[in-house]
Image (tube, grey):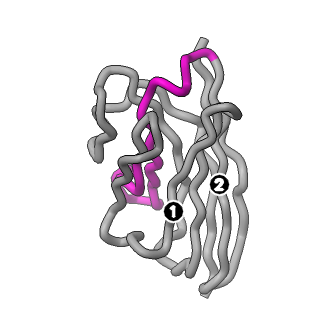
């Protein structure tokens, strides 16, 4: 059974940093692309960042480019999202996801097969 478990939630202030982690089990983690998405209250779930199985190919949403960094450690079966210079509009529930069907990371949430339960990030102004 595939499980993705996010951690690192927090309440921070504008300009602060936070690192999210997503631990995977039940799948050959090192073979698959991973992504981070977020969903703010009343809004659609949106793409944040994605990383290939090798960690070489990275994609970011324009809204987070230059502030967020996605990375992975395959030996630890974990993907990370380092978030710097946080803004109020980064407030959302953040989800990690695994794509087991496609060879390259995707910005489309429909490309992902497994999802974590989400972790809350709140940024106060």
Query: 119 or 55, which lies in front?
Result: 55
Horizontal relation, residue 10 to residue 31: left or right: right
Q: Quadrant of residue 125?
A: bottom right
Place of residue 85 in the rendered image (x, y in percent of width and height, measured from the top left): 56, 81
Query: 21 or 103, which lies in front?
Result: 103
The image's mark for residue 69 is 1
Q: Quadrant of residue 101?
A: top left
Q: Quadrant of residue 120?
A: bottom right
The region drawn magenta spans 26-50
Give the labeled residue for mark 2: 20
Horizontal relation, residue 109 to residue 87: left or right: left
Count of marks placed on residues: 2
Whether residue 78 is situated above or below residue 37 in the rendered picture: above
SS at circle 2 = strand
Q: Name which residue lies at 63% across and 69% down.
A: 122
Place of residue 100 in the rendered image (x, y in percent of width and height, measured from the top left): 39, 22
Query: Which of label 2 and label 1 is nearer to you?
Result: 1
Place of residue 56 in the rendered image (x, y in percent of width and height, measured from the top left): 41, 47
Q: Quadrant of the N terminus?
A: top right
Query: 23 or 124, which lies in front?
Result: 23
């Amino acid at each position: 059974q595939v499980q993705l478990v996010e951690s690192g939630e927090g309440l921070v202030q504008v300009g602060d940093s936070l690192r999210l982690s997503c631990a995977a089990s039940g799948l050959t983690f090192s073979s698959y692309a991973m992504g981070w998405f977020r969903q703010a209250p009343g809004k659609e779930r949106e793409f944040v960042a994605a990383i290939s199985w090798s960690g070489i190919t990275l994609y970011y949403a324009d809204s987070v480019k230059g502030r967020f960094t996605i990375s992975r450690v395959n030996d630890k079966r974990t993907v990370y999202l380092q978030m710097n210079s946080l803004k109020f509009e980064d407030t959302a529930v953040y989800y990690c996801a695994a794509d087991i069907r496609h060879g390259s990371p995707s910005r489309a949430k429909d490309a992902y097969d497994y999802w974590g339960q989400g972790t809350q990030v709140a940024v106060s102004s």
